[in-house]
Image (tube, helix red, strand yellow):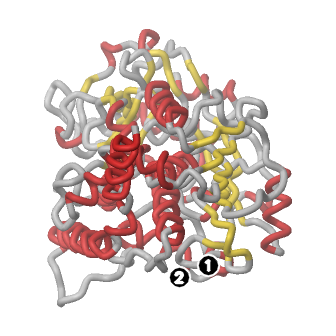
Amino acid sequence: MGAAGTWAGVPAVLEAGCSRGRPLRTYNRLVMSTAEETHVVGGGLAGSECAYQLARRGLPVVLHEMRPERPTPAHHTGEFAELVCSNSFRSDDPHHAAGVLKREMEAFSSLIIGSARAAAVPAGGALAVDRERYAQRVTAALEAEPLIEIRRREVTELPDGDVVLATGPLTSDAMSAVLAELLGDEYLYFYDAIAPIVDTESLDHDQLFAASRYGKGGDDYLNAPLDREQYLAFQEALVGAEVMELHDFEKKLFFEGCLPIEEMARRGVDTLRFGPMKPVGLTQPDGTRPYAVVQLRQENLARSHYNLVGFQSRMTWGEQKRVLRMIPGLGKARFERLGQIHRNTFVNAPVHLDELYRLKNHPRVRLAGQITGVEGYLESAATGLLIALYLTLEGRGSEPLPLPATTALGALARHLTESKAKHFQPANINYGLFEPLEGGRIKKRERRRVYAERASAELGRWMTANRSALIRGEREAAEEGVAEAAVR
């Protein structure tokens, strides 16, 4: 399984028709100029992907983004699709669930994944990016689309027509009030944390070694090895560190996939050694395996900054500097950004959303991104992409059939609509969300390949069934162009 267009089961003609642009852009101008516009509220990953996909398919869009006019506690720029917590889109292994989702998105010429690949930095088997270059590419692509009107101000009430709310985990108070009125109940929420970033020149490289786990990616990561004594001292310091306190009712609301490092340390002396500080797959230059290790991932192409992988934190900033400088090689570290914590808002999707991401009681309103209850950059962008496909099909008179839960895109919707409402929690893409495999027992080491191959085949069938609606206009645009030339 490789890049879009060559992935087994995916019709190359559909990928080509959607991605190469020239005929579709002509079609945009000549055929769809009077179509009713769709309002996409929020210029994060989901909103950016949704707006781009709609415009590339000839549907006019108004993209609303309140930044930089009104900033958020976590963002630093006014760029579209700015990455906040990490610079990684996780595994790029084509048999990993995250890798399958990337390739499904690439089959539809994803703006987010395409920009990520263009701004990629070495990260072993993961897809990580230079944040600045990545956001600049996304922003430039959106600003260049003639069918996207960008409005830089806060939306305080629902626009008329089709609306995609992709306001993210830091939805403004005004839009939160609108949603609360629409849904008739409180939001759910959890607390998310952001990892620190250090200046490369401030590190003691003599105490670090460059390597990727199991050799995937060569020497893409810097690794700080700890012996048993160093690890125990570090773990004890984390447990005793001063943190930004939460109310009692908030303490169980951390997302399990993004726990603060000090919270993990409190769960047991070896928790970190089986989590973000696991030494497996890493060998020191002397041929030994460290007792524990802290990995630092390249943050930008210049290698001037590295982030501490898995080291989200809610320690006070003074305590972060004290404790993190106990890590070998970080004794004099300069921190470009310290860990932070913020509230992440989402709705009870099984109660409120249908399979097409529409609000059940207000079907002209769709939700996209983390506010739906998906977790992660990749998953957020995927919801925006899928909503754009469904809106395109509806706009051309087709009744959209949801992608099957045998695909990664369909599995996300399955999680959002079929989970038990009482225990609903955000989730990253994983094979536990997919429709279970059939055909008897399959060896564990073969399951991921079988899941991936089935997803590819099912996506191909769905794309073939919807090809004419999704790429319709290429022939009409060509005919219009011939007619125009004849008149001239």
Looking at this view, name the residue that lies furthest to the bottom.
Answer: 440
Nearer to us in this view, 298 or 398: 398
Residue receiving disc 2: 418
Residue receiving disc 1: 350
Q: Quadrant of the N terminus?
A: bottom left
- 257 to the left or right of 445: right
Vertical side of 145 occupied by 425: above or below: below
Q: Amino acid at mark 1?
A: Pro
Vertical side of 266 occupied by 185: above or below: below
Question: What residue is shown at x 59% (from left), y 60% (from top)?
Answer: 368
Looking at this view, name the residue that lies furthest to the top.
Answer: 201
Question: What residue is shown at x 32% (from left), y 59% (from top)?
Answer: 104
Sequence-earlier tag: 1 or 2: 1
Task: Note whether residue 134 is visible.
Answer: yes
Q: Secondary structure at mark 1?
A: helix
* Residue 65 pos. (x, y %): 69, 41
Q: Quadrant of the C terminus?
A: top left
* Residue 342 pos. (x, y %): 69, 45
Q: Residues within 10 Å of mark 2 (few under 14, many from 20)?
A: some
Q: Secondary structure at mark 2?
A: helix
Q: Residues within 10 Å of mark 1 (few under 14, many from 20)?
A: many
Badges 1 and 2: C-beta atoms under 8 Å apart? Answer: yes
